[in-house]
Image (cartoon, helix red, strand yellow):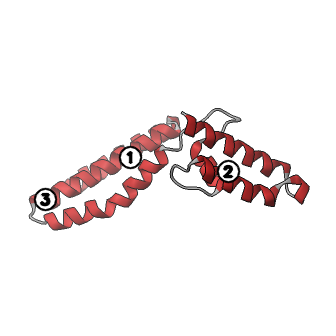
Amino acid sequence: MPALILFIGILIGGFALYRFMLNASAKEVIAMVLTVGALIIGSALFFLAITGRLPAALGIVAAMIPLLLSWWNAKERVKVPPGEMSKYDALEILGLKGNPDEEEIDAAYKRLMKKVHPDQEGSEGLAKNLNQAKETLLKSIKK
């Protein structure tokens, strides 16, 4: 009897999940996955802690730190209006990391522009991206 109740519950849950996925936006699906993941991790940590396996629980937390850091860094990738460039994209285009100063930005820009300038058989699109990346980073420094 308990197996039948579990089976019926799984069927109802699966149907509810199917209906949710039909009408959900990408943001809602991501929010649901994050919520369910957090609940599962929290439940597992609680279970390990109350059963006396706290070192294992702490190991799980330590293993999750890189995932949390990558999620936190992904938050820096804010959406920008079309035609504009985010600071993260600008840093990636110029091959820079962190918070570079004006000299580092200029050095990276000049080094890359020598390679992609249209007069050096480069591409106008690449040169335009480099110009936009430089402008974006310089604006972020002056803020």
Around disc 3, counting alpha carbons within 10 Å, would you say few (fewer than 14), some (14 to 19), or many (20 or more)? some
Q: Amino acid at mark 2?
A: Asp
Residue 71 appears in view: yes
Element type where label 2 sits in the image: helix
Q: Amino acid at mark 1?
A: Leu
Along the line of sight, the residue nearer the viewer: 115 or 74: 115
| Horizontal and vertical percent position of residue 32 | 40, 42
Residue 106 bears which disc, if any? Answer: 2
Residue on which disc 1 sits:
34
| Horizontal and vertical percent position of residue 138 | 62, 41
Query: Tags 2 and 3 in contact by the CB under 8 Å rule?
Result: no
Residue at (74%, 55%) from the top-left corner?
Answer: 110
Around disc 2, counting alpha carbons within 10 Å, would you say few (fewer than 14), some (14 to 19), or many (20 or more)? some
N-term-proximal mark, 1 vs 3:
1
| Horizontal and vertical percent position of residue 98 | 51, 52
| Horizontal and vertical percent position of residue 122 | 86, 57
Residue 49 bears which disc, if any? Answer: 3
N-term-proximal mark, 2 vs 3:
3
Along the line of sight, the residue nearer the viewer: 9 or 82: 82
Element type where label 1 sits in the image: helix
Around disc 1, counting alpha carbons within 10 Å, would you say few (fewer than 14), some (14 to 19), or many (20 or more)? few
Q: Amino acid at mark 3?
A: Ala
Residue at (73%, 49%) from the top-left corner?
Answer: 130
Front: mark 2 or 1: 2
N-term-proximal mark, 2 vs 1:
1
